[in-house]
Image (cartoon, grey):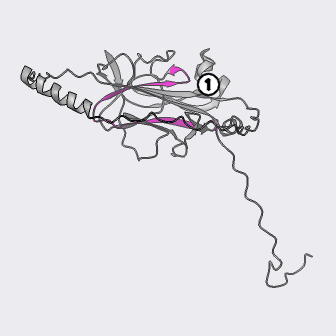
Amino acid sequence: MKTLLALCLVLALAAPAAASQLVDVSIVSRDSRQTLAAHHHKGKTYVAGQPGEYYAVRVANKSGKRLLIVISVDGVNAITGQTAATEQSGYVLESGARTEITGWRKSTEEVAGFYFTRLPDSYAARTDRPANVGVIGVATFREYEEPRPVAIAPQPSSRDEAAQAVERNRAAAGADERPAPSAGAAPSSAMSPVPPPLQKQAEKLGTGHGTRESSPITYTTFRRAGNRPDEETAIFYDSYDNLVASGVITRRPPPPPPDPRPFPQDFVPDPRR
């Protein structure tokens, strides 16, 4: 089965948005070259994007072996353009490699850049698939390995089994009885605080089909160890204001003004003319 091999780039290390056993996944602003801050809320990971901002999906292979990663943006496979499924084509990362997926694959030489945009302008919406706009997914597969021959240990003799049975009976006879654990304390009847009402959200962000740019790759072969991904990573995104409105980000209040000073200046200034 043919899959695509990404050109592996050597990148500066940064805190990933989503870390797992096999890969680290981050979303990087290509305008500022900064990794977008990850916000964790109710078991999900979010990043805040800005309309018009080009971004990349940075993936680092933490394992000691080759991996296949299938990239989904807004529910669309970033290589084939199909509605995403984990059994579709992906990129192969060598052991310890790090790379950035910068756009929709147009050929073995070019991609159309990922950028944050209004939902109606997103590639998914413009191809009549807006239902999953706002999430980036990475499905990771290990490579199949031929099983190694297993040495069979010798079976114990009947005399050894009898001796072990005697020891087990002695241990059981000398075991102390332990009292059953007492019931836990009754749950508190205090009511949980009621969260503030959520604010009204503006139109959500999607990912657009940007300008074409060079991104050469080559074909390779890869046999998956199984039909199901060994790991799945999901990073949700929206505008900063929408993430605040939905309660994902807590907006910090502005600092209080400084206290007035009785003697703010040492000398008398000239009056206005």
Q: Quadrant of residue 197?
A: top right
In the displayed structure, does residue 143 sit left or right of residue 131? left
Q: Amino acid at mark 1?
A: Ser
Question: Residue 213: x and y, percent?
Answer: 47, 32
Q: Quadrant of residue 61?
A: top left
Span of residues in magenta: 50-76
Residue at point 73%, 58% (across, down) = 255
Mark 1 residue crowding within 10 angstroms, few (<14) / some (14–19) / many (20+) = many
Q: Is residue 192 magenta?
A: no
Question: Residue 50: x and y, percent?
Answer: 63, 38
Question: Residue 19: x and y, percent?
Answer: 44, 38
Quarter placement of the N terminus: top left
Give the camera-side residue of 186 and 110.
186
Q: Which residue is mark 1?
A: 122
Query: Residue 186, relative to residue 260: is it above or below?
Result: above
In the displayed structure, does residue 113 sit left or right of residue 68? right
Marker count (numbered): 1
In the displayed structure, does residue 53 sit left or right of residue 229? right
Quarter placement of the C terminus: bottom right
Q: Quadrant of residue 53?
A: top right
Q: Is residue 68 magenta?
A: yes
Residue 151 seen from this side: no
Residue at point 60%, 16% (across, down) = 129
Q: Residue furthest bottom?
A: 267
Question: Residue 36: x and y, percent?
Answer: 54, 42
In the displayed structure, does residue 239 sit left or right of residue 256? left
